[in-house]
Amino acid sequence: LRCLAGQGDVTSVLDLFMGTGGGSALTVLGPLVARGGRVFGIERDDAAVETAREILASANLAVFPVDAPATQIRAASTHSAAVLLHGPAYPEAHKCEACALQPGPIDTLCTLAPMDLVIWDPQDVTLAGAFEWLAVERACRPRYVALHNTNVPAHAGWLRQHL
């Protein structure tokens, strides 16, 4: 990941689960910051947000609720090397498939910067996680995707097959 983040064509990274796994965002941060790049993420639960705060304290991590206005997030991202949205990306995804097709927080992040690299390291597979990936494909169109734990049942193996 560090070598990939150090390539000149990678300036923005989306780590959807940056507080869950913990190390990926920190691994890519150094090479990105050296070139003025940024790390973005979304975390669903409070404990993962606190872990992300600890890991990315040196990056002046800015945390916003998922429904924060894009202008507020954009303004903060100019002063911070890491921006994290807190809350579910698609809270109604379990209720209706069409809900996930509506623009959401992932779309907001991807309008701030082209996401050159997406890091995908979920703790488990959920319907909301599948919708999150569909939003990444639709809104972000990353050049690179780093998948973790593809060999562990109920993790990212389905996405490897999808890609």
Image (cartoon, helix red, strand yellow):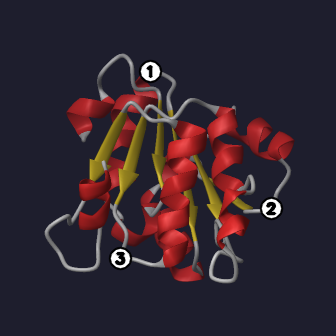
Residue at figure coordinates x 81%, y 44% from the top left: 70
Mark 1 vs 2, N-terminal side? 1
Give the distance between the C-alpha atoms of the residues marked 1 and 2, in whole angstroms: 29 Å
* Tag 2 secondary structure: loop
Percent position (x, y) of residue 61? 59, 52
Number of the front mark, 1 or 2? 2
- Looking at the rendered structure, the kind of residue marked 3 is Gln
Residue 35's disc is 1
- Looking at the rendered structure, the kind of residue marked 2 is Asp
Give the distance between the C-alpha atoms of the residues marked 3 and 2, in whole angstroms: 23 Å
Residue 64's disc is none
Q: Quadrant of residue 84?
A: bottom right
Q: Quadrant of residue 80?
A: top right
Query: For this view, does 21 lie left or right of residue 141?
Result: left
* Tag 1 secondary structure: loop
Give the distance between the C-alpha atoms of the residues marked 3 and 1, in whole angstroms: 30 Å
Which of 75/119 is in front? 119
Query: For this view, does 105 lie left or right of residue 134?
Result: right
Residue bearing the label numbered 3: 123
Q: Is residue 30 visible?
A: yes
- Looking at the rendered structure, the kind of residue marked 1 is Arg
Residue at figure coordinates x 37%, y 69% from the top left: 122
Number of the front mark, 3 or 1? 3
Residue at figure coordinates x 40%, y 26% from the top left: 10
Residue bearing the label numbered 2: 67
